[in-house]
Image: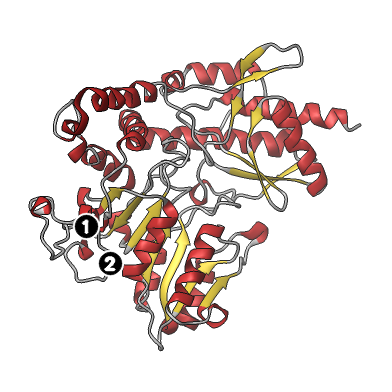
Amino acid sequence: MHDYQATADWAAARDAADPLRTFRDEFLIPPHRDRQDQSHEGVYFCGNSLGLQPRAVRDAVTAELDYWGELGVEGHFKGRLPWMDYHENLRDDLASLLGAEADEVVAMNTLGVNLHLMMVSFYRPTDARPTILIEAGAFPTDRYAVESQIRFHGFDPASCLIELEADEPNGILSTAAIERALAEHGSRIALVMLPGVQYRTGQAFDLKTITALAHRHGCTVGFDLAHAVGNLPLQLHDSGADFAIWCSYKYLNGGPGAVGGAFIHQRHARGDLPRFAGWWGHDKATRFQMGPQFDPTPGAEGWQLSNPPILALAPLRISLEMFRRAGMPALREKSLQLTGYLEWLVRSELADLLEVVTPTDPQRRGAQLSIRVIAGRAAGRALFDHLVAHGIIGDWREPDVIRISPTPLYNRFADCLAFADAVRAWDRTRR
């Protein structure tokens, strides 16, 4: 049972008792200037779109710039973290966060690039099995990628792309609906490609159950974890998924356009799957022999194409170290508390104004609550603009959703209360 109260004293007491409270001090919180031109800390609920900058990032990037200036090419072999193996310094923390083995993950490229690279290996359509299953309303990156891959292989998306419609209120897609689709179309489906968390609704999917259902029908399974990594506890290895891809600029705080990542299950580590090969994916022991025959590094690193961008990996390394120190179980526990409090505020204090689109079951969601203004899109957009003007930053997703994501590394109970207070203030201006 909870003891939520919509008071500043209650929120302050909960924040003071938060065992993760000091992590907030390790981030730069964007300021807000009020109407009197006074600067205050803003309220930032947009970690689901772009995570905040850890304070330690500046020194980490500067250190690599200094090594470049002092060492030139020798920086590949000298310095505190030589560039030749730099990406390996992220591997263990990334694997721990994803519930994967170390050789199953790699930080490389960006999400869209990695999705295409994974489909080169894992979407192998035939005349009998040419189809891809995605959710209706998938994020455009996924939708564009799968359609273009279908066309690239000479098939027609009109008949070879299944977009599964939601069967529960507010755009929620049940596991039962996925199971029914597989029962009906499974023999024709080459790839099931679903999100870990759906970007618009905030719904979290059961990766292990979906994988087992799809594998039963002979389908390959991949997941887009853009909104799940750093948000939910993941057990990718145990899920059995064939692959997954993600970006690192949301909950992982890797910076705008940050290096993304890929997971390839261990059972494919030494397989003969086709792939687009690159020099950096060649076995490290013989890479510099410059031979003509590609000999891939076992595991996910064998899918690398080019040497890693050190200046872009440095921020992600810093953030992953923070996740290691905080621990995902503790972050998830705080996330449940923050999101539960925000939901309670909406339902108990703002029920005549707002509705929550995201599932009420905490196991079916992460940090994000997708919120709709009951009065309609125009009122929703007006509220969103009011929030921004008063230093409360969420984001807007068409047609009518405001996404508010209390991120446990740096958000507080006081932030959730500030959101509710701002909504009430907006409502008073309408009367």
Callout 1–callout 2 Cβ contact below 8 Å = yes
In-front residue for pair 336/280: 280
Tell me the quarter of the picture where residue 429 sits: top right
Q: Residue furthest bottom?
A: 128
- Is residue 224 shown to the viewer in this render? no
Image quadrant where one finds the C terminus: top right
**Image spot of residue 6 (x, y percent):** 67, 25
The answer to whether 310 appears left or right of 55 in the picture is left
Mark 2 sits on what residue?
275
Q: Residue at x 59, y 66 (%)?
A: 136
Taking 160 as reference, is 271 above or below it?
Answer: above
Q: Secondary structure at mark 2?
A: loop
In-front residue for pair 307/24: 307
Decide: few, some or many residues near mark 1? Use Cα within 10 Å; few <14, some 14-19, many ≥20.
Answer: many
Decide: few, some or many residues near mark 2? Use Cα within 10 Å; few <14, some 14-19, many ≥20.
Answer: some
In-front residue for pair 283/225: 283
Q: Secondary structure at mark 1?
A: helix
Taking 151 as reference, is 335 above or below it?
Answer: above
Which numbered disc flags the more N-terminal residue, 1 or 2?
Answer: 2
Mark 1 sits on what residue?
302
Image quadrant where one finds the N terminus: top right
- Is residue 364 shown to the viewer in this render? yes
From mark 1 to mark 2, how far is it between C-alphas?
9 Å
Q: Amino acid at mark 1?
A: Gly
Q: Residue furthest right?
A: 431
Residue 290, which numbered label? Answer: none
**Image spot of residue 7 (x, y percent):** 67, 20
The answer to whether 131 appears left or right of 323 in the picture is right
The answer to whether 30 appears left or right of 243 in the picture is right
**Image spot of residue 216 (x, y percent):** 35, 76
